[in-house]
Image: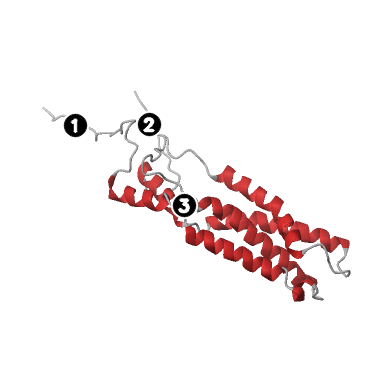
Amino acid sequence: MDALPPDPPAHYSYAPGDIYPRGDRERELCFRASRPDWLYLGALAALDVGAVFYGTNGDLKYSDSIVYRFTGPIAIGLAWGATIGGGWLALPKCDMRWVGEPAAEGDVGSSVPLALSLALLAGATAPVINATAIGYALPDNWSTLEREMHVVAAGLAGFGGALLPYLLPPRTWRAQRELMRIRLGTTAAGGPMLGYTFEF
């Protein structure tokens, strides 16, 4: 007589009240994600100050090169967009007394809608920041088209700048993403997975 097949591995389900970090690695990640990344926020503020200083430089404003003059609104827009997008990523993303649990289907929440919303906000406000920085006394040799394109350039740069922090995220965002990967049971390089089940 054949032996019975081995029991399937136990599928452990955590209790609803199990809301704290599990294990040292989760505690470490949640602790890193529970405080603002002040160094990152300070670097963004310094980037803003540097971009405004560069964009308001008199040599740039009164330059004969139209390409050189456009670097000002682009720099201000990129810096402002990075501050809008990266500022949210650098805020606390975990609480040691309440660690979120992904659904059984996986981490179904997407950060794309919020990232695009912040990028649109940065794109809409970057021309205002640029105009405030350079002032109302514009050189007479600027054409109407150039003045309009400064608004467009700052807006597009602000939109793109808000997405740049996802390429170089702060420690709070990195720790929160790693914590969710651990809770989902995937590896650090994990991505979308495909599976199937069937019953007789």
Q: Earlier in the sequence, mark 3 or mark 2?
A: 3
In the rendered view, does 124 fall on the left or right side of 28? right
Separation (CA) of disc 3 from disc 1: 44 Å
| Quadrant of the image containing the N terminus | top left
Categorize mark 2 by other alpha carbons within 10 Å: few (<14), some (14-19), many (20+): few
Q: Nearer the viewer, mark 3 or mark 1?
A: 3
Q: Amino acid at mark 1?
A: Pro
Pointer 1: what residue? 5
Q: Earlier in the sequence, mark 2 or mark 1?
A: 1
Pointer 2: what residue? 197
Residue 148: image x %, image y %?
82, 58
Separation (CA) of disc 2 from disc 1: 19 Å
Pointer 3: what residue? 173
Query: Mark 3 touching mark 1, by CB under 8 A?
Result: no
Separation (CA) of disc 3 from disc 2: 34 Å
Please name whichever residue, 42 or 153, is drawn nearer the observer in this view of the structure: 42
Q: Amino acid at mark 2?
A: Thr
Categorize mark 3 by other alpha carbons within 10 Å: few (<14), some (14-19), many (20+): many
> On the image, which quarter does residue 66 sit in?
bottom right
Q: 159 above or below 112?
A: below
Categorize mark 1 by other alpha carbons within 10 Å: few (<14), some (14-19), many (20+): few
Residue 36: image x %, image y %?
47, 53
Residue 41: image x %, image y %?
53, 59
Residue 142: image x %, image y %?
86, 67
Name the mark on residue 43: none
Query: Mark 3 touching mark 2, by CB under 8 A?
Result: no
Query: Mark 2 touching mark 1, by CB under 8 A?
Result: no
